[in-house]
């Protein structure tokens, strides 16, 4: 939601793209559509140009209705665009600075629709937003999105026909099975192993990743590294979880241990082990950072509120659940946020990188761990930050904005009141008030 009467305050970024479009729909429009859909979404403005100072200005489209009709015809043609992910209100003719423009709100495509690609070929027609521009995705990125489209099976369920059960570490299995109080047949029950057509047992991808002697032979990019007071590297996920968790339990108070354990588990079960890089967990005086290959499959905002669970590795989840680790699906991330809030620390935050695909979860230990901002203490700078945040995130309550600005709630309420008075922001509800940019 943009303040269209004040376009000049906006700049092109990873969520906003302006196109003059006086000569018709530009070819680059479709690259941007794909790029936004495959990243975090964004807004395309047709009939808007970028001035030399990077500010945006409307130019007045002579036939906006004709352009909308042409756009809808193309976006619904599967030979041109793989999927129309737009709702009824996502394409609108608007007035900006008294001139007619077209606003196209492109949401982030759900994982079972990604990649959104052009001209019938995902390997040559898939784009992602990179800063202010659109770039063609590498083959590895496309294949990662194609793997994530699968609804019935997750990649870790794959039975490794060329790998025998002797590839699993006996010591790790002994510890794991001792938790279950069961014999080796339990590995079949939790999805760590299966039988081929001749009845011969083999580990699954999950089983090899969790308990393998050398899973790198099958997953060459696998690395499991912890950097804290010392550097620790483990060969498989079960050893890595136990080693890192023990260090976190030793180094942090009980109040923080649950949240850190949830963050560690989240990192492991959501990693793309077929991807380009490995897991890296780092601890400094200011933060603990959990980095894993692959993007978060569920909507991050929804996951923070709970009840949403879409892990990339269902069998790895089952293996952990069997020994009572991470039992309540969809509740781990909200509990982590709640624990950090109760400790009086800045809220955790996620970051996504697209080349290569990585998700990073940061749990700040001090306020200085939150991303550095150029706040001068002046109200107009903080108001600009609120507008930027609402542009990217659509809505927020005062508590969320208070954490963003690292400012007292009373000051944030005053800033929001001034923005409402200036007709830049509006709110719905009362407890809590939900703020949005005014249409």
Image: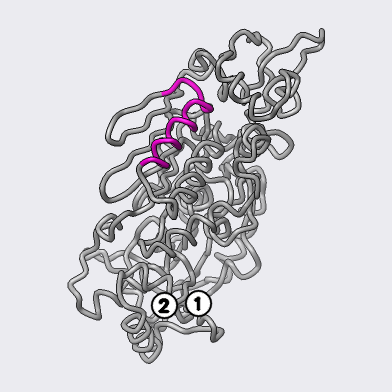
Looking at the picture, tell me which residue is in the foreground, 336 or 67: 336
Label 2, secondary structure: give it: helix
Label 1, secondary structure: give it: strand
Rendered image: mark on residue 4: 2
* Residue at the far bottom in the pictured view: 421
Measured from the top left, where is residue 5 in percent x and y? Answer: 39, 81
How far apart are the alpha carbons under marks 1 and 2? 8 Å
Q: Which residues are magenta?
A: 234-250
Category of crowding for the residue at label 2, using alpha-carbon neighbours closer than 10 angstroms: few (below 14), some (14–19), many (at least 20) = many
Q: Is residue 212 left or right of residue 345?
A: right
Residue at image location 42% in from the left, 48% down from the top: 361
Q: Judge whether 364 appears above or below 92 on screen.
A: above
Measured from the top left, where is residue 426 in percent x and y? Answer: 47, 84
Q: Is 422 inside the magenta-drawn segment? A: no
Residue 207 shows in this picture = yes
| N-terminal label among 1 and 2 | 2
Q: Is residue 267 left or right of residue 289?
A: right
Q: Nearer the viewer, mark 1 or mark 2?
A: 2
Category of crowding for the residue at label 1, using alpha-carbon neighbours closer than 10 angstroms: few (below 14), some (14–19), many (at least 20) = some
Residue 82 shows in this picture = no
Q: Is 244 inside the magenta-drawn segment? A: yes
Q: Judge whether 23 appears above or below 402 on screen.
A: above
Q: Main secondary structure of the magenta part?
A: helix
* Residue at the far left in the pictured view: 376
Q: Is residue 25 left or right of residue 316?
A: left
Residue at image location 69% in from the left, 13% down from the top: 202
Residues marked 1 and 2 touching at CB (< 8 Å): yes
Residue with the mark numbered 1: 94
Q: Judge whether 172 appears above or below 355 on screen.
A: above
């Amino acid at each position: 939601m943009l303040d269209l009467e004040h376009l000049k305050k906006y700049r092109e970024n990873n969520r906003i793209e302006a196109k003059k479009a006086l000569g018709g729909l530009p070819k680059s429009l479709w690259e941007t559509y794909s790029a936004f859909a495959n990243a975090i979404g964004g807004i395309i403005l047709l009939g808007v140009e970028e001035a030399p100072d990077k500010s945006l200005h409307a130019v007045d489209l002579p036939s906006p209705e004709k352009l909308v009709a042409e756009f809808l015809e193309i976006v619904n043609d599967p030979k041109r665009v793989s999927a129309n992910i737009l709702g009824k209100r996502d394409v609108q003719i608007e007035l900006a600075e008294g001139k007619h423009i077209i606003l196209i709100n492109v949401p982030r495509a759900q994982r079972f629709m990604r990649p959104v690609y052009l001209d019938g070929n995902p390997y040559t027609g898939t784009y992602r937003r990179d800063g202010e521009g659109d770039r063609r995705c590498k083959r590895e990125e496309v294949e990662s999105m194609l793997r994530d489209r699968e609804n019935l099976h997750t990649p870790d369920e794959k039975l490794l026909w060329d790998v025998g059960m002797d590839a699993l570490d006996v010591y790790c299995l002994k510890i794991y099975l001792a938790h279950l109080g069961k014999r080796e047949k339990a590995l079949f029950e939790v999805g760590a192993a299966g039988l081929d057509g001749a009845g011969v047992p083999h580990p699954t991808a999950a089983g090899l990743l969790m308990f393998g002697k050398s899973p790198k032979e099958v997953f060459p990019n696998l690395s499991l590294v912890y950097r804290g007071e010392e550097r620790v590297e483990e060969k498989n996920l079960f050893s890595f979880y136990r080693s890192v968790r023990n260090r976190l339990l030793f180094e942090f108070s009980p109040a923080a241990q649950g949240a850190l354990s949830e963050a560690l588990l989240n990192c492991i079960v959501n990693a793309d082990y077929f991807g380009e890089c490995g897991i890296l967990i780092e601890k400094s005086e200011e933060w603990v950072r959990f980095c894993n290959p692959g993007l978060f499959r569920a909507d991050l905002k929804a996951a923070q509120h709970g009840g949403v669970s879409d892990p990339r590795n269902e069998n790895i989840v089952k293996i952990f659940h069997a020994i009572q680790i991470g039992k309540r699906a969809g509740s781990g991330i909200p509990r982590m946020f709640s624990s950090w809030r109760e400790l009086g620390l800045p809220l955790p935050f996620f970051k996504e990188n697209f080349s290569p695909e990585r998700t990073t979860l940061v749990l700040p230990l001090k306020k200085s761990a939150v991303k550095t901002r150029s706040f001068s203490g002046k109200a107009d700078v903080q108001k600009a930050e609120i507008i930027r945040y609402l542009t990217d995130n659509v809505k927020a309550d005062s508590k969320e904005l208070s954490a963003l600005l690292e400012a007292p709630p009373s000051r944030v309420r005053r800033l929001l009141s001034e923005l409402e008075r200036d007709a830049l922001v509006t709110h719905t509800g009362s407890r809590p008030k939900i703020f949005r940019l005014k249409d």
